[in-house]
Amino acid sequence: MKEIIYRIINFLILIALIIIFGRKKISEIFESRREKIIKALDEAEKTEKTEMPTFDPESVSPENVSISSKSDESEFVQKLSGIEKSEKETCLEMRREMLSEIRLEAINKIKAKAVDMFSRQPYRSMLSSRESEMAVNMLKSIHLTPGDIAYLKTHDVLYVTLTSAYPMPDNVVKQIGDYTEKMLAEIGGKTSYWVKQDPSLIDGFCLRIGDTIYDCSIKEELYRLTEITQKEFLSGDESVDDILNTISKDIVNMGSRVHTYQLGRVLTVSDGICWMDGLADIMYGEVVEFECGEFGMVLDIKSNKIGCVIYGKYEHIESGSRVRRVGRIASVPVGDQLLGRVVNALGQSIDGRGIIRTTERRPIECHAPAIPERAPVDTPLHTGIKAIDALVPIGRGQRELIIGDRQTGKTSIAVDAILNQKGKDVICIYVAIGQKETTVAEVREKLEKYGAMDYTTIVCATASDSASLQYIAPFSGTAMGEYFMYSGRDVLIIYDDLSKHAVAYRELSLLLHRPSGREAYPGDIFYLHSRLLERSAKLSEELGGGSMTALPVIETLAGDISSYIPTNVISITDGQIFLDTELFYEGQRPAVNVGLSVSRVGSAAQTKIMKQFSASLRMKLAQYRELAGFSQFGADVDEATKKTLDAGKRMMDALKQGRNRPLSDWKQVLLIFAVSEGFADNVNTEEIEEFENNLFSYFENVRTDIKNRLETGKKLSEEEIDGLREALNGLREVV
């Protein structure tokens, strides 16, 4: 009988290899062999064996498996060496997909064959003789869960159901019933013992005590085999022999084991929310699997039912269907393999570049670093944006909010901050929540254009995704960043944006029948964002000294920063960058409002030289904004006021910056000093950009000594400042 199985497997593998490697039509190649193969299979099916079916790994070894398409495989490998890298990756990905299909089809065929074999004599009699031994093994693993004990205290009776594929011997049925009755009697409980038959188990039996299943059936073994096989990654370099070896090893590991898990029942399902009963021992945030293969996450636990959000399509889930407890908290894959990739909220690849090959995972929710585990924020994280690095500096490990109305350049600031980390050993994670797919595609295109995707991961939960995926997306991105942070590396994570995240959570909460509060948001919306953002920190040296800097984005309506969600997030973060709509339409880009923007870390996150030259800049700009408000009414102003207005206007023009053009720190310092010292007083507004280019070019090509000194970031002495003024005077003569 085993020969039948492996002939079928070989036949399926042959088909797939021809699809992968062949250049002719399948009908042309198979026309001469099709009838022979079918005839051989028909003859093999008529053959009956009387021995017990066993899965011998040696019989599935490459030496005993003949594959007529090995020559095609070697030819394919030779062709790969002569094509471009991108084409090679595409071919390898196609090969991975086809090998995966071969593997799955082979397992499905084995499962179908097992159903047929284990239902006929003499295999039935031989398997039945082992049921007593299997029952003893099962009884050794039985234990009452806390949920069972709690149920007994309120109901005094616990339902026990023994289900088998075929009628079991009376002595085995009685043995299991007596044992469970005795076990419950010791804690003052009673049993309601039921015996059932279910042919879908194929063979063996399972015992249900309360919500817990003790399963030693063939159906469960095949389920586990499929799960194990699907988790084994294919690099694309494997041969068919390797796949056969892997399957044979997994089959050998199958045996008369007792698998323990818990089952519940779906009560109702609608709008991506599922209510279940049972699963009394389940935890908040735990993953469950539905009969249709979809997964969900527990988000609400009540005394009589459990609320769950569904990751995928909920149309396939029906009321009354079973739901299985997976036994793990919701987690996502992490590691360097995610860099350069676009993934969904579950960490699955959506960029068309195949499965992400990583074996490490991290829970999407975990504790934030405690106070003793943190270090002070004292290292700058330069964004390359003059108005931010000079006025509202950001440090590594800080949480700085970007807030403003729609279409005011919030995402542009985030993208520029990512671009500026090139070559600085900072990992970047961009979490898109509720954005349009075209917007995310544009961000990815910009990052690829400037070479920033090499150190960036995009976590995408677009507006077309379900509210549950939008809800877990920022937590998934944070888990990916924490992997690097706890490895001693620096991370920049951007949440774009948390306003839509709050809306998604509000939708889920209302569907879960939680009482609404202000603006219909649930009462724990503050706790939701605080436990998310508190995970960004700078770790102590004992923990590796890594850091994760968070730039959450909040969208306001008509500039109202006093509404519910903005005030919540402002109180959680270490400062905010407020983008003013009026400034934006006046042409000030980025439209940073100096008066409403603040960094609570302040100059501690600046280099010494930036702190030296920008210390009075905020006050001067605030004074300019105030005077500009009065002067717009056309009142006459004195000479001193006019001079202040001109200087402020020139500095505002100098702080303008184009998109995707981040500046290094020394260039920002040089420009701020030159403008504040009056070296740009004779420069018209339209010529500021030309002045910048000449300034930077002069110090890069002529006064490299001063440029090198500025790059150190150390404070300048009075003599060095005089030398800088002298160099700027030299620039005037040259220009």
Image: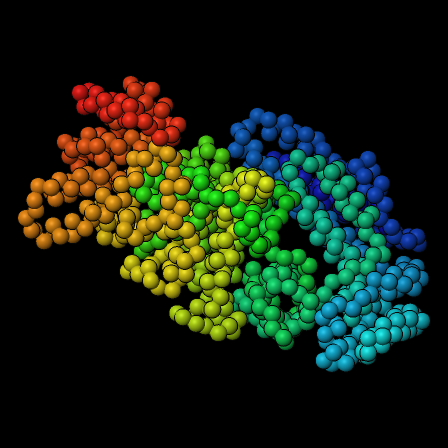
Q: Is residue 344 left or right of residue 188?
A: left
At horizontal 44% and vertical 47% (from top left) the residue drawn is 398
Identify the residue at the far left of this view.
636
| Quadrant that contains the C terminus | top left
Q: Nearer the viewer, residue 641 or 404?
A: 641
Q: Is residue 208 left or right of residue 476?
A: right
Asked where in the image residue 146 lies, by quadrant, the reply is bottom right
Scheme of colours in the image = rainbow
Q: Nearest the camera: 499 or 706?
A: 706
Q: Is residue 298 above or below residue 611?
A: below
Instruction: Determine if residue 674 is in view.
Output: yes
Residue 327, percent across and down?
69, 59
Front-most of residues 204 and 549? 549
Residues 530 and 190: in front is: 530
Residue at x-position 75% and y-position 52%: 225
In the depicted structure, whether residue 656 falls above or below residue 133:
above
- Marks counted in the figure total 0
Residue 588 visible here: no
Instruction: Give the residue drawn at x 36%, y 37%.
Output: 384
Q: Residue shown at 48%/58% (left/top)?
A: 530
| Residue 472 position in % (x across, y down) | 52, 57
Picture coordinates of residue 216, whole percent (x, y)? 82, 61
Task: Residue 699: name its quadrant.
Answer: top left
Q: Position of residue 359 (x, y in %)?
A: 65, 44
